[in-house]
Amino acid sequence: MKKSLVYAIVIYCMSSVAAYAADTPASTGSQSSATATTNTNPLLTLLTEMNKASKQLSYQLSYVVMNRNSIEPMQYSHAVENDVQIAHLVYLSGPMREVIRRGGEVSYIDSSSEPFTIRANYMVAPIIPLLNSNIGELSKYYDFIPLGKAREAGATCQVLRIVSKDGMRYSYILWVDEKTKLPLRADLLDRGGDILEQFRTISFATGSSVTKAMSPLQNVQLPQVLSLPQGNLKQTYWKVTWIPNGFKPEELNRYKLSGTDQTVESQLYSDGLFDFSVYVSDRDNQSLKSQLVRQGRRTLQIFASGKNEIAVIGDIPPETAQRIAQSVKFAAVPPQALNDTTDGVDNGVSVESSTQ
């Protein structure tokens, strides 16, 4: 149970912001702005239709996820039963793994660990990007560039590039089926235009046959919902003074690393398309002065600042991760503050997260 609880906490921390970005309606002003823009921007209209189709249609996508080190075949199915979204992701190779979403609960089932369910509206799993995304919110920070038409999985698609306005994050090239408005392919590109990861649909289906196949999931018994700890910090002694526009902070957390006495604080940030986390701890004899590692889409930046070690991990370019790490500032704090792991502790040093 301990292993699955730790895994569940990681999943929860990663999914909470993504779920917010996907399922929280924009404000009235944002909706009006987005509606006005779609009248003159056909690509924004297309993406809005894609967002609607991904939430309302019954469909099944069989696709592969490819990066430089692996190819993973997947099958993602979606339907709506009694106004409740049901989704089912199956890994088609290796040990049996699947993820089931039923309304506001997501179950993770893996043959190598105990299955569990958490309350969330979004799977933490390799699904095709921009499914269920808040397009109106993304349009504030990304430009949509038309690239023409192409065929994918036997269907004619509109192709577009999604590029951040500030150039501080990765971009996508997206293939959207003209008939169903579903995304059939997505290529993740680094800032130099090289492909980091691909999602390519091999075949897909829509309609009542998918609804019928998904119907049993409405009543199947799923693992018990785990009660997960909420963010246990309201204040801390460090502050991220720079993040790219559009990234929003989630809950602060403090915990001890398994098997050690080292205490770590962390905060997750997301713009609805990409996310990263900042980790802060005391330096020790094992700490590195600085390290930068990129593996595929994931970047790890470790940076030493005085008596503290900062790590930035996420789906962002190395240059962005480095700038975020170097922007972390520290206030004077009693030595015992970092070692106090009591929930809701107030260490007396207020921090406001920057979203500039």
Image (spheres, rainbow, N blue to C red):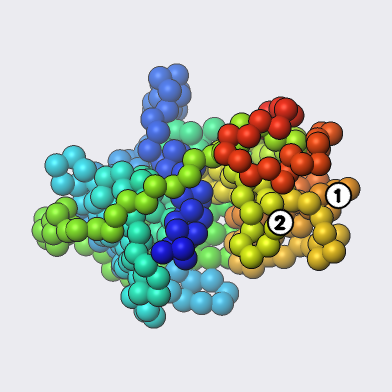
**Sequence-first disc among 1 and 2:** 2
Which residue, given by chain and number where applicable, does mark 1 sit on? 307
Identify the residue at image location x=84%, y=34%.
332
Which residue, given by chain and number where applicable, does mark 2 sit on? 262
Q: Position of residue 66 (x, y in %)?
A: 49, 71
- Judged left or right of residue 74, residue 198 is right
Q: Quadrant of the C terminus?
A: top right
Identify the residue at image location x=61%, y=50%.
255
Viewer-nearest of labels 1 and 2? 2
Q: In the rendered image of this protein, does residue 256 appear above or below residue 340? A: below
Q: Amino acid at mark 1?
A: Lys
The answer to whether residue 292 of the structure is visible from this angle is yes
Identify the residue at image location x=57%, y=74%.
68
Q: Quadrant of the N terminus?
A: bottom left
Q: In the rendered image of this protein, does residue 13 appear above or below residue 216? A: above
Question: In the orientation shown, which residue stands out farthest toward the right?
Answer: 306
Rendered image quadrant of residue 195: bottom right
Q: Amino acid at mark 2?
A: Gln
Give 189 or 156, whichever is nearer the viewer: 189
Q: Position of residue 301 (x, y in %)?
A: 74, 57
Question: In the orientation shown, which residue stands out farthest toward the bottom?
Answer: 94
Q: Secondary structure at mark 2?
A: loop
Question: Which class describes the residues within 10 Å of circle 1: few (<14), some (14-19), or many (20+)?
Answer: few
Q: In the rendered image of this protein, does residue 27 appear above or below residue 129? A: above
Rendered image quadrant of residue 238: top right
Identify the residue at image location x=54%, y=71%.
67
Q: Position of residue 89 (x, y in %)?
A: 32, 63
Q: CA distance from mark 1 to mark 2?
A: 13 Å
